[in-house]
Image: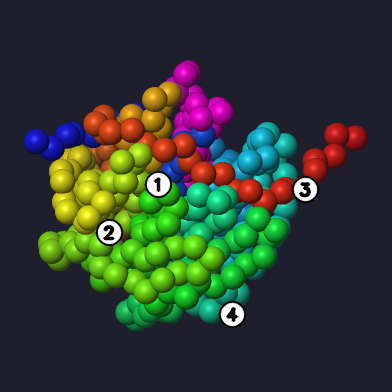
Amino acid sequence: MNVHATVVFQARNTLGEGIVWCEREQALYWTDIHAATLWRYRLLDARADQWPMPERLACLALCEADGWLLLGFTSRLAFFHPVSGTFAPITTVEASLPTRLNDGACDRQGRFVFGTLHEPPAGRARQPAGSFYRLNAELSLERLDLPGVAISNSIAFSPDGHTLYYCDSPARTIQCCDYGERCGPSRTFARLDDPRGEPDGSAVDGAGNLWNAQWGLGRVACYTPDGRLDHCIDMPVSQPTRPAFGGPDLATLYITSARDGLDAGALATEPSAGALFAAPAGSTGLPEPRFAGTPPRISTT
């Protein structure tokens, strides 16, 4: 029987995405991409904070260095220290292409893997112009040998770190490959048969199940390690975007969502679109991997 998600915080995000759980702060971080805003929600006191960003913020990761985040903006990567408000640029990404960063997550070794998506002119169809990259601990950037995509998504790693999951959302297929210093050949992990939906962000639990937010279908689907659909978490909104395991025992699935593209009629039937949701997972997640790279020192003088 399917589980139902409930609202934790009515953020009213245009495009909530990139959610991660910080066990040190007992807090959730995520982004509203189109609003260029970083969000934090602390469970202990139900406090929500937000930081305006200099451009659209597509994805983020926790850092091993206390107090720092790694941010993936539209066209570049940077460190950010929320307490001091310090930004430290790292590198630009695809600056000459009509693309922007999209989904991203740290691998089990503390390297940040992310993808880009194609942003065509108005009225033009998206093309497979996006790619996947890895930011290493010494801050070198390498392009991964994976097929081009129109919209990169679903980046996640198996518990042992040897399998990478990813997708091109419009293809409605979640792919996987052997993962190490190089990526092995891609293979199909799961397909969405319903043409109304697309795979969005994913998370992996301790048993190796992949939990995928499915845009347009109003659900988070749980797939077993062999790609079989096991069950779903039903959402009261049509556009869930990304799940993350959180809470003191990592047994709650927190899910971001979006209002983007919904007209007045749809919003009337989905008043919680853009909210932060939670549901009991029935399984336990894994601690969020942290980026191993070293941010700059903050001057105290």
Which residue was labeled with disc 3?
Answer: 296
Q: Is residue 89 visible?
A: yes
Counting residues from the start of the chain, the first of labels 1 and 2 encountered is 1
Counting residues from the start of the chain, the first of labels 3 and 4 encountered is 4
Dot 2: within a 10 Å radius of its alpha carbon, few (fewer than 14), some, or many (20 or more) residues? many
* Residue type, label 1: Pro
Q: Specify the segment rendered in magenta.
A: 23-49
Q: Answer with left or right where residue 279 lies relative to residue 20.
A: left
For the residues labelled 3 and 4, say whether their Cβ atoms are less than 8 Å apart: no
Quarter of the image with the N terminus is top left
**Quarter where residue 261 is shown:** bottom left
The secondary structure type at the circle numbered 3 is loop
**Quarter where residue 102 is shown:** bottom left
Is residue 261 highlighted in magenta? no
For the residues labelled 1 and 3, say whether their Cβ atoms are less than 8 Å apart: no
Tell me the mark number nearer the camera, choosing from 1 and 3: 1
Which residue was labeled with disc 1?
Answer: 159
Which residue sits at x=31%, y=41%? 207
Q: Answer with left or right where residue 51 lies relative to residue 285.
A: right
Give 286 or 76, whichever is nearer the viewer. 286
Residue 107 vertical position relative to residue 152 in the rendered view, above or below: above
* Residue type, label 2: Pro
